[in-house]
Amino acid sequence: MAYVFVERFTMSIWKKSFSLEGLNNGMKNTLCEHLQMHVTEVGDDYVIGTMPVDSRTTQPMGLLHGGASVALAETLGSLAANLAVDQTCYCVGLDINANHIQSMKSGLVTAKASAKHIGRSTQVWEITLQDEAGRLVCISRLTMAVKRISG
C-alpha cells in the first residue's frame, strides 16, 4: 500500500496589515488601557490577549467580574473582526453572550478569539477565557455586523 502525504498550507484570514505594538497602542485612553488588556499573539486565524484579575476587574466578592470577562472577549473579537475585512469595511457588534464556567480571584486571564464564520454581512467569533493553569473560565460568542465605509 502506498501512502500519499499532503502538505497543508495555512492562509491568514487578515486583510489589514498590523503589528502587535500598533494593536496595543490603539488601546490607549480606552477601557482596554484602564483594565490593562494586551494583545499578546496573532495567529493566522486567531487573536490572543490578556487581562489581570485585580481590583479593577473583580466584583465585590473578589471574583473576576463577568462584565470584565465580556469586555475582554468583545475587545479581542472586535479587533479580530476588523482585521478580517478589507479597507472598505469596518465591523460593529450585534450580539455577545457569555457563559461563566469557573471563577478567578487573581492572576492573569488569557482569551483567544477564533473565527467561526466570516461572511460578507456578518461574522461570528468564539472567545475562550482561561486561567493561568489553562482551566476554562468563560466562553463567549460575538456576532459582528460588517459595514461598508461610505465615501
Image (cartoon, rainbow, N blue to C red):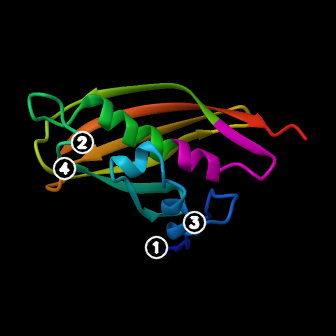
Q: Quadrant of residue 10?
A: bottom right
Instruction: Pick the residue in front: 94 or 150.
Output: 150
Q: Position of residue 122 (x, y in %)?
A: 66, 32
Q: Residue at x 29, y 27 (%)?
A: 99
Tag 3: residue type? Thr
Residue type at mark 1 is: Met
Dot placed on the residue nearer the N-terminal end, 3 or 1: 1
Counting residues from the N terminus, which is met first, the one under dot 3 or under dot 2? 3
Residue placed under numbered mark 4 in the picture? 131
Q: Is residue 147 above or below residue 97?
A: below
Q: Nearer the viewer, mark 3 or mark 2?
A: 2
Q: Secondary structure at mark 4?
A: loop
* Residue 151 pos. (x, y %): 91, 41
Identify residue for label 1. 1
> Which residues are drawn in magenta?
78-91
Q: CA distance from mark 1 to mark 2?
A: 62 Å
Q: Which residue bears the numbered disc 3? A: 10
Query: Which badge, 1 or 2, is on the more N-terminal residue?
Result: 1
The residue under label 2 is 56
Tell me where residue 59 appears, x and y as whole percent.
Answer: 17, 30
- Which sits in the foreground, 10 or 47? 47
Q: Is residue 1 above or below residue 101?
A: below
The local crowd at label 1, few if under 14, some if 14 to 19, many if 20 or more residues have their Cα within 10 Å, is: few
